[in-house]
Image (spheres, rainbow, N blue to C red):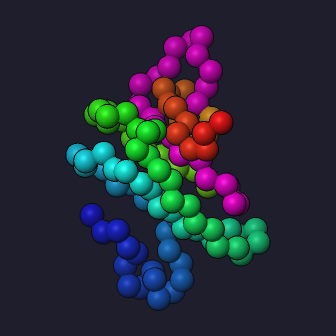
Amino acid sequence: MPTQPDADAYASGKIPQSAIVYGNFPVGEFLFVKWKSKSNNEIYSRLIDLRRSLPSDMDDKHIYFYIKDAEIFVYVVTYKPHGDNVEDCSAPVFRKFVCSVIYPLH
């Protein structure tokens, strides 16, 4: 899987804002994300330590991150619907699935 945009997208400055990377990977230690806010043109970056946040078994789980201006939210999500008495996931697209917030930690 490529980890960079193709040359045409990079040259045009119009890099896709979403992607899916999947497969059987070793559990990572860090997540580095860099983005530019459309609202103020500021560039932000975060290096998020995953060592204490990720479960040791990531089978059937996915890392999802959501960016809003200067904030980033990172979740571990399963595609299993949660029960009726469980609060909805705060990740907008995974509202009805089992998830846990791993960044920011409160």
Residue 39: percent from left, percent from top: 76, 68
Q: Quadrant of the rendered structure where residue 5 is?
A: bottom left
Q: What residue is shown at x 46% (from left), y 38% (from top)?
A: 53
* Residue plotted at (47% across, 50% down): 49
Whether 76 is among the magenta residues is yes
Between 8 and 42, the one lying in front of the other is 42
Q: Which residue appears farthest toward the bottom when viewing the image? A: 11
Left or right of residue 69, residue 89 in this image: left
Left or right of 62 on screen, residue 82:
right
Is residue 60 something one can see in this rendering?
Answer: yes
Position above or below: 40 against 49: below
Find the residue positioned furthest to the right.
Answer: 40
Please say whether residue 77 is one of the residues in the magenta stretch.
yes
Magenta part of the chain: 68-89
Task: Name the residue rendered at 52%, 39% in the picture.
Answer: 102
- Across and down, in percent, residue 55 comes to 37, 33
Q: For the N terminus, which image quadrant?
A: bottom left
On-image quarter of the C terminus: top right
Please count the marks in the image: 0
Image location of residue 99, percent across then percent down: 50, 31
Eyeballing the image, is 87 above or below 20? above
Q: Is residue 68 above or below residue 91?
A: below
Q: Residue at x 70, y 60 (%)?
A: 69
| Residue 91 on image: x %, y % | 59, 39
The front one of 50 and 8 is 50
Q: Is residue 93 visible?
A: no
